[in-house]
Structures are given as structure tokens and as C-alpha cells.
Image: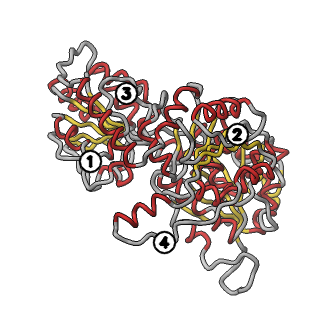
């Protein structure tokens, strides 16, 4: 039953979100969404004012990835929503629980020339999120909010968009029901669990591929590795599920062409919580598998080009637990060679370093000094492409990157959202000079909030990855160099601290000090930084 207290719908929605566990909202108020802001403080929700709606969207993304809770953004009609569509697309690609709530115009069929008018605002948003719906009544708004929240718990996490007409937001209404919807992820069929357990029992060289969908089950994954003597790869999103020092962990080198050889050597491959997408493997197939099992909550993934001998629809965490229960007392006969795995990793690291020389040393430095629970947000930049392979990750869900959609400018605002979410836990941002241009204004938010946030800015003075691609394609490089500002002075103008270390020792010192500094620190590095 609805609560009897009458408020404008915009205020009721904030109170509802608070009652459903939302503590933080990212956004920018405007004349068309002011009613959403009426109830924020009264409800006890913290609002983070972004400098651009793209930043608000990335902050919501970063917050969701860091906390496991939905990242919520309040936006205005038209350009406000459009500005956030890039983060929404990124969240869709990377399975992030974002709830975007915007206003919309009351009537567009017979009126033209209205402020922020679009031909089809909901339709535009629908292209980059799971669904986009218009709530024409209070009950519809409440129902859509609960639908979004329960789908975050029961389905693949992807952004949802709810828009409410301006007049409807301001209309006084009763509140929503106190009864929040609840749900859980689908479970694998017992016969599928039994079949996989039997196949593992007879396998000599079982292999797991762990993706981002298996992060919540990292303890079960580690137990299953120990039970079976299996080797494993992880996708980038699955890094940390298995410790880097596990002697049979090939790491995140799944995209290395030679990984095909290792996968084809297995007599059983079990891929858990991964699309095996282009950005995971950078080829058409993972290799010719003797037997392939895929476990996923997304039926679409299970029916793609990587067709499994046994597709299993269910939660990876529960699946691994149930398989392990059936293997209690099992003595594995795995014949994987740890020395061979070590040799492969050393070779692949050397190839990675040679492809982009002078970068891996920064990852090695970070590995020496970062606290164990540091959360890292990286951008589309060459330093991240190297470090995603070479730097060890001690726990899952602690390295976040714009993997699929691949947008520039992600790392800074996402790290701000992540830092807001984790509080005193350490967070760092790794971004390139060109990507920093996209969202550099959000540095003002980090200063305003006093966030202890090291921002590692890699400046090679160009779009080096694109230049390299042009050279490989026998195209004379062009349009790859833009004039950069003095980034340190720019950071200081925002009120941040800035430092430009000349060697790796100075880099380590700068990062260590930045983690303790009461405010953001820009750490400016170039290929000229000495060993």
C-alpha cells in the first residue's frame, strides 16, 4: 500500500530510492529536472555535482563497479541525457548497474521549438541501455524503479533509463508501497552440474576461463582450482579471481595469439561468466576445444558464435559451489606443467613490453607500493593496455576499465565515483593525455570533495596507438598530434596538487604521497621518465 504522505512525485522518487538502499546520486540540476532535487536532502541522499553529464554518468558507473550497488544519475531533458549516453553505452557493454532518471517534455507531437526538445528521447536512450521507458504516472515511476532494482539482482547488470514528464514530476502524489521487490540469479540445472563434475573427474588437463561474471564467486573459483588441478586464463574483467602467483594461472593473456595453443592442449575447457567477446580474445575463436562448457546468466551469450558442447544457464558462483560439492574427496590427476605456464607468461610479457616499450616499469613500480586493496580505474591509453596484462591484481573487481564500448575519458570521473563509494580505501586513476581532455573538468569535483586520489597522467604527446595503427596499415600518420596544455599548471589551477617525477623512484614516491594527500594529485609522467 502507498504511504499516505503526499509530496511532489520527484521528491517521492528520491525518498523511494533512499528506502531501497540508494545513498548517493550523481547529476546536474536544470530547469527541467528541479523537481527531482526537491527531496534529495530531506531523504538523506548525498548528491555529487558533476561538471558535465558525461562525468555524472561515468561517476555512477565507477560507483556501481566499486560498491556493487546501483549507480544513480539525475539528468535533464535533451542534451543532459544525450551527454550521458556515452557512459550508458559503456555501462551496457561492461555489465554495470546504472539507473539513469531524467525528465522529459510533457508533449512533443504537436509542439516544436521547446527547450531541450528531441524527436524521440526515450528511443535515443534505448540504443545504449537495457531499456528506456516513460513513466506517465506516479505508479508507473515507482514500478519502473522497482523493476530496475530487481533486475540488477536477477539478470545481467545493464543500465536502465526512466524518464518522467516535467508536469508529472511536480504533481503531488502519495508515496510508493513499502514492499520492495526481491529476487536472485538463475541457477544451473542439477543435471548440468552433475555432467560437468563427471567430466572434470576424468579430465587430465582441465582448464577454466574466468570472466567478469565470475567475480562474485572468486572464493568458489579458487577452491575449484585447488580441487581439480586445472589451469586457467582470465579475461581482463576477471583479473584477480585467481591470485597472480597461482602457478597454473596464465593470467589475462587470453588475447595473446599463442593462448590458442594452450587452450587447445586442454581436454576440457569451462568458461564462466564471459562473453568471450572480441575485446576479450581479439580473434574469432578461442581455439579448437576438445570439450567446451560455458556458464552464463545471459542466454544471448550462450547462443553466440562460441557454441559450447554444454551451454549452462546459471549463476557462475552457485555453479562452481555445486560442482565443488560433487567433487569432495576427488583426487585430481591433472598433468599441467607449472614451469611451462611460467615460461609462457614470461614470453608473453616480453612481447607486451616490446610492443609498447618503457611502460611496464610503471606497473612494476605500482605493484611494489600500492596497498593490497587499491582500486584502479584506467582509460583507453597505451599505459593501461600494457599494465592490464603485466601488473598483478590481488583481488577481483579492483581494476576497472572501459573494456567493450572503449570510450576515452572514463578513468577520472569513474575513479571519483569509485572513491565516493569506497571512502577511505585507496583508489587511483590511470589516464592518457588525450583521454584527459575529454573529462578533465571533473578534476574540480575531486578537489571540491577533497578526495585523496592519485591521477596518473601518461603523456606521450600524441594518439600513439592510432599512429601505430596507421603505420601498420601503411598510412602516413596524420591527425594524431594535438597541442597539450601544461597539465601540471592546469591541475594546480583547479586546486589540485601536481608533480612530474623524472624517474621511477620519484614516481613511486609521488604515488605514495598522493594516497595520503587530502585532495587529488596529478602525477605527470612521459616516456622520458628514467628507470
Mark sitting on residue 257: 1
Write down the residue under mark 3.
Answer: 221
Task: Compare residues 107 and 367 and report the one nearer the observer.
Answer: 367
* Count of labels in the image: 4
Residue at x 49%, y 29% (from the top left corner): 395
**Label for residue 420?**
2
Q: Circle 1 — which element?
A: loop
* Of labels 1 and 3, the one closer to you: 1
Tell me the distance, in whole angstroms, between the alpha carbons under discs 1 and 3. Answer: 25 Å
The mark nearer the N terminus, 2 or 4, is 2
Q: Secondary structure at mark 3?
A: helix
Q: Is residue 486 above or below residue 97?
A: below
Q: Residue 222 versus residue 473: which sits nearer the camera?
A: 473
Q: Position of residue 408 (x, y in %)?
A: 56, 58
Q: Which mark is residue 478?
A: 4
Any part of residue 453 in sight: yes
* Picture coordinates of residue 361, whole percent (x, y): 49, 36
Amino acid at each position: 500500500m502507498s504511504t499516505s504522505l503526499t509530496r511532489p512525485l520527484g521528491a517521492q522518487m528520491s525518498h523511494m530510492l533512499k528506502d531501497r538502499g540508494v545513498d548517493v546520486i550523481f547529476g546536474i540540476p536544470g530547469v527541467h529536472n528541479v523537481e527531482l532535487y526537491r527531496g534529495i536532502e530531506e531523504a538523506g541522499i548525498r548528491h555529487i555535482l558533476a561538471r558535465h553529464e558525461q562525468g555524472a554518468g561515468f561517476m555512477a558507473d565507477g560507483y556501481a563497479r566499486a560498491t556493487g550497488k546501483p549507480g544513480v544519475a539525475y539528468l535533464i531533458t535533451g542534451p543532459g541525457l544525450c551527454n550521458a549516453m556515452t557512459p550508458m553505452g559503456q555501462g551496457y557493454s561492461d555489465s554495470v548497474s546504472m539507473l539513469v532518471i531524467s525528465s522529459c517534455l510533457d508533449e512533443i507531437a504537436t509542439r516544436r521549438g521547446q527547450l531541450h526538445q528531441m524527436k524521440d528521447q526515450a528511443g535515443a536512450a534505448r540504443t545504449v541501455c537495457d531499456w528506456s521507458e516513460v513513466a506517465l504516472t506516479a505508479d508507473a515511476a515507482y514500478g519502473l524503479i522497482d523493476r530496475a532494482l530487481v533486475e540488477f539482482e536477477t539478470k545481467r547488470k545493464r543500465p536502465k533509463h526512466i524518464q518522467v514528464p516535467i508536469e508529472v514530476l511536480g504533481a503531488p502524489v502519495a508515496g510508493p508501497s513499502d514492499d520492495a521487490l526481491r529476487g536472485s540469479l538463475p541457477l544451473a540445472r542439477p543435471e548440468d552440474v552433475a555432467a560437468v563434475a563427471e567430466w572434470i573427474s576424468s579430465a587430465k588437463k582441465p582448464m577454466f576461463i574466468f570472466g567478469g561474471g565470475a567475480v562474485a564467486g572468486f572464493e568458489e573459483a579458487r577452491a575449484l582450482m585447488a580441487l581439480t588441478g586445472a589451469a586457467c586464463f582470465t579475461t581482463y574483467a576477471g583479473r584477480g579471481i585467481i591470485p597472480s602467483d597461482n602457478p597454473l594461472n596464465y593470467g589475462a593473456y587470453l588475447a595473446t595469439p599463442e593462448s590458442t595453443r594452450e587452450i587447445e592442449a586442454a581436454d576440457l575447457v569451462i568458461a564462466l561468466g564471459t562473453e568471450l567477446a572480441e575485446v576479450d580474445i581479439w580473434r574469432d575463436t578461442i581455439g579448437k576445444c576438445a570439450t567446451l562448457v560455458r556458464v552464463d546468466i545471459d542466454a544471448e551469450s550462450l547462443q553466440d558464435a562460441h557454441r559450447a558442447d554444454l551451454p549452462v544457464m546459471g549463476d557462475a558462483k552457485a555453479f562452481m559451489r555445486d560442482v565443488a560439492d560433487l567433487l569432495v574427496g576427488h583426487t585430481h590427476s591433472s598433468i599441467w606443467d607449472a614451469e611451462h605456464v611460467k615460461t609462457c607468461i614470461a614470453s608473453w610479457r616480453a612481447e607486451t613490453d616490446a610492443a609498447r616499450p618503457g611502460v611496464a616499469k610503471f606497473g612494476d613500480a605500482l605493484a611494489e607500493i600500492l596497498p593490497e586493496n587499491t582500486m584502479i580505474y584506467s582509460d583507453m591509453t597505451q599505459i593501461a593496455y600494457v599494465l592490464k596484462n603485466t601488473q598483478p591484481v590481488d583481488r577481483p573487481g579492483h581494476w576497472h576499465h572501459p573494456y567493450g564500448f572503449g570510450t576515452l575519458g572514463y578513468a577520472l570521473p569513474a575513479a571519483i565515483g569509485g572513491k565516493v563509494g569506497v571512502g577511505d580505501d585507496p583508489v587511483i586513476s590511470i589516464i592518457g593525455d588525450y583521454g584527459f581532455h575529454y573529462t578533465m573538468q571533473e578534476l574540480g569535483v575531486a578537489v571540491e570533495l577533497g578526495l585523496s586520489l592519485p591521477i596518473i597522467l601518461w603523456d606521450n604527446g600524441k594518439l600513439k596507438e592510432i599512429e601505430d595503427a596507421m603505420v601498420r596499415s601503411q598510412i602516413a600518420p596524420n591527425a594524431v598530434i594535438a597541442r597539450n596544455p601544461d597539465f601540471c599548471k592546469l591541475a594546480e589551477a583547479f586546486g589540485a596538487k601536481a608533480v612530474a617525477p623524472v624517474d621511477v623512484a620519484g614516481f613511486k614516491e609521488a604515488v605514495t604521497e598522493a594516497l595520503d594527500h587530502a585532495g587529488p594529485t596529478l602525477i605527470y609522467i612521459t616516456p622520458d621518465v628514467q628507470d
